Amino acid sequence: MLSISGCCGDKSDEATIEYTPINRALTDSADHVDDDEKYARLLTEKNTLKKQSEELRTEMDRLHAIIQSLEADKKQLKHSQTTSLDYKRKYEEVQQILSDTQIKQQMLYKKISHLNEEIAALKESSHLVQQTLTSQIQILQHELDMCKDKLQTYETNVHAHETNKENESGNKTTLTFAENQITIALDEKARADSLSFCTDMLTYNNKHGTEKTFSFLTFLDSLIKTNKMNSFLNKVNSQLIDAAQLLAVLTLIGVIYTVKCMELQNAGKSVRHTVNSNSNAMKQDVKRKVKHLCCYIVRKYGTQQTEKQETSVVSHNNSNTNVEFYGFVLDITKQQFADNIVKWVRCYIDEDGAIVINE
């Protein structure tokens, strides 16, 4: 006789399966992270239910095997009424357990189906959120591009305003006018400042302890050899460099050269804080030091104007005298600047900064 006592779980162990649908309408992109967590939780729950379903199927197969064994033993039990009743009772008990197990499995299948629907809805809502985010990013990128265009227009207008203001105020560093060219050319202090800026040698020790020298010419030469000059020339919006732009470019290069000298003097340590706190003063100081050099380049390598301009100059007895001079204009390409700037600075040094003035 086959014994089946304790082969099946108690009916009291049956769990009530409850199902509560999730909210399938996602309207806020901030819920995207919650959706991912919910999606992972649903998948985990689905896998758990699948495992339980497989366990129930195994249990059902085992119960079917027991029933078949009971059927096989049925013939052997006919000789005893008591044993036959006991068999019938156990047979009915197994049938009931099998029926309950089938109901459990059906409930699990139903819950898995609901979970599949939930997961599909969650995937669809996530797709809609992704589309919404993509659309919003495109709109923001378009707005950013518009802001960049507005900023560029604003900077252009500010630059034009500052240039006009400088011209109207008769700023002595505006090399476009013959009067300013002559004033700068005759300024001995400006000449001394430019010559000093171009010829001063900085002595320092490199990381190996070897003594080295560094100068403005050395810096210009390194910019040309390493093709870094283009980064400065790209600051010029037009294709040609005129007298005003020449001063701006040489001022910018001179500022970077000054910062490099400061770093070498500080054993390569950053001087960003010092530079940032004195950037405007440094720019004005370098501009003052290179303006005579710029005037030399404009009047030596520029084009003489066809008409003279009346210029007020200070005579030996400190009186103002009006004299007519030719002005010079400069229109060179960026490539011409890069190819010749080192040579021009060397000539300026060799000629001791002398500027020829012809009445």
Image (spheres, rainbow, N blue to C red):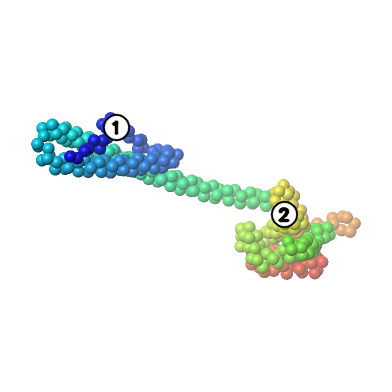
Left or right position of 319 against 28: right
Secondary element at image label 2: loop
The C terminus lies in which quarter of the figure? bottom right
Identify the amino acid type marked 2: Lys
Q: Is residue 101 above or below residue 300?
A: above
C-beta proximity under 8 Å, tags 2 and 1: no
Is 244 left or right of 72, judged from the image as shown?
right
Residue 75 place in picture, x, y as percent: 10, 40
Q: Nearer the N terminus, badge 2 or badge 1?
A: 1
Given residues 136 and 195, the one toward you in this image is 136
- Identity of the residue drawn at 61% across and 58% down: 237
Q: Is residue 48 left or right of residue 65?
A: right
Residue drawn at x 72%, y 54% is 269
- Residue displayed at 14% across by 43% down: 72
In this rendered view, identify the residue nearer to me: 56 or 135.
Answer: 56
Determine if residue 319 is in view.
yes
The answer to whether residue 311 is seen in the rendering is no
Q: Is residue 209 left or right of residue 13?
A: right
Label placed on residue 13 = 1
* Residue at which label 2 appears: 269
